[in-house]
Amino acid sequence: MRLQSDLLEILKQSADKKDLTLNAMITNILNKNITYDETVNVIPNMVVPYDLFFNIITKIEAPDVNEIVKSAPNVVKKLFDIMGVQYDIDHVIHNYLTTLSKYCNWFEFSYKITGNNYRLVFCTGNSPKWTTFVQQYVKSILDSLKILVVNDSLHDGIVVFEFSHRDYL
């Protein structure tokens, strides 16, 4: 593959910062672009910088935030219908929450699935109103999936949901 020397240098520096090989860095970039095209860009989206959306959410009143939160399941269902993906917890984790984390910067997302037990962790930053928004947004999606959350905690910008797979069967 031939690349412009200035682009190659930028890629090398970025790979070094992330402790990756140049090949791994290029593979990650290509994978992200393909994933974006196949998932995020499936429906018309308006790109809104995170800072702007964050300011909107933190400045509006609770009833308006609640209306946005209530729309979460419908947004995900519509996206999944277009993509031909089943609306279930595993697809929500892999095809929505992970993608939202990567491309929208709403939160850093990690999860652990051990047998039937699920643990979803969202690091949202230090704004209590933003953290509450993310917690309510995700809870709205989980509720629509008929998931009974065993532990729902919110502390210092960290939101954790724990539940068992059998809770929604």
Image: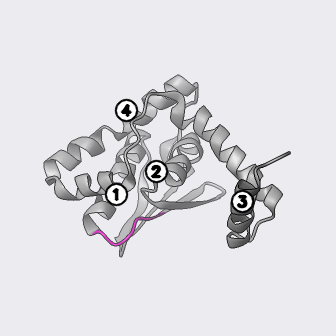
Residue displayed at 58% across by 24% down:
84
- Inter-mark Cα distance, 4 to 2: 18 Å
| Mark 4 secondary-structure assignment | helix
Callout 2: helix, strand or loop? Answer: helix
Residue type indicated by callout 4: Asn
Q: Nearer the viewer, mark 4 or mark 1?
A: 1
Residue found at x 48% / y 30%: 79
Q: Amino acid at mark 3?
A: Leu
Measured in 3D between alpha carbons, the distance from the residue under mark 4 to the one under mark 1, in whole angstroms, is 24 Å
Q: Would you say residue 120 is visible in this rendering?
A: no
Task: Tell me the CA gap for discs 4 and 3.
Answer: 38 Å
Determine whether 128 is above or below 66 in the image: below
x 51%, y 30%: residue: 80
| Majority secondary structure in the magenta region | loop
User: In the rendered view, does 37 fall on the left or right side of 68?
Assistant: right
Residue for badge 3: 11
Nearest the viewer among 81 and 30 is 30
Instruction: Read off the residue under disc 2.
Output: 104
- The residue nearer to you, when weighing 64 against 37, is 37
Give residue 87's position: percent from left, percent from top: 51, 33
On the image, which quarter does residue 50 sit in? bottom left
In-front residue for pair 1/21: 1
Q: Which residue bears the numbered disc 4?
A: 74
Amino acid type assigned to the residue bearing label 1 in the image = Asp
- Magenta-colored stretch includes residue 125: yes
Residue at position x 46%, y 50% in the image: 104
* Spatial CA span between label 3 and label 1: 26 Å
Where does label 1 land, which residue? Answer: 51
Report how far apart the C-alphas of labels 3 and 2 lie in the structure.
22 Å
The amino acid type of the residue labelled 2 equals Cys
The answer to which of marks 4 and 3 sits earlier in the sequence is 3
Question: What color scheme is it?
Answer: one colour
